Image: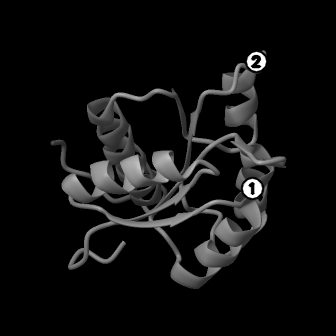
Amino acid sequence: MNSSQPPLILAIDDEPEVLQQLADVLGKAGYQCRCCATAEEALELARAVNPDLVLSDISLGGESGLVLCEQIREDPALHHVPVMFLSGAQIPDIIRRSHAAGGTYYLRKPFDPDVLVELIDKALWMPHLVENRAAGRHVPAG
């Protein structure tokens, strides 16, 4: 993550109103936000812009956010990018399935903007903790 620029969040949802709401919330929280409506477009854009975090719906107009997450995990250039799910999907066992696909967090729609930002902050911090631990570096608390 480039520390001179705000983190870039890639938001994927097939509902334009949700994308607008996400762009507003993320912008107010100091993040850059790029939006798209399909999994195919999202994967292409992710490869082009290398986001700091992907925020995806589970149901993307017939496509699956879970499959998108698996594709991101399999891509050597993107496998480190945290993927968070934001969904209203009433699918049995969806939280377990989202974690099995490689998702970091799952938040139900309608969402609380403060909770969303808090989870994004945590998800952005976690890869750096893991990286630093693997390299044997101490990470100061707080």
Q: Residue at x 33, y 59 (%)?
A: 137
For mark 1, give the secondary structure: helix
Q: Residue furthest bottom?
A: 48
The circle drawn on residue 54 is: none
Q: Is residue 28 above or below residue 101?
A: below
**Residue under circle 1?**
68
Circle 1 Cα neighbour tier, 10 Å, few/some/many (<14 / 14–19 / ≥20)? many
| Residue 24 screen position, x and y as percent | 30, 53
Q: Which mark is residue 93?
A: 2
Q: Secondary structure at mark 2?
A: loop
Amino acid beneath label 2: Asp
Q: Position of residue 29 (x, y in %)?
A: 22, 52
Q: Residue at coordinates 26% horizontally, 52% vertically from top-left? A: 139
Above or below, comparing residue 26 to residue 78 in the picture: above
Q: Residue at x 48, y 45 (%)?
A: 18
User: Could you tell me the amino acid type at mark 1?
Assistant: Leu
Res 46 → quadrant? bottom right
Q: Nearer the viewer, residue 21 or 34?
A: 21
Calculate the distance from the C-alpha at mark 1 to the C-alpha at mark 2. 18 Å
Q: Residue furthest top?
A: 92
Q: Nearer the viewer, residue 104 or 25?
A: 25
The answer to whether mark 1 and mark 2 are in CB contact below 8 A is no
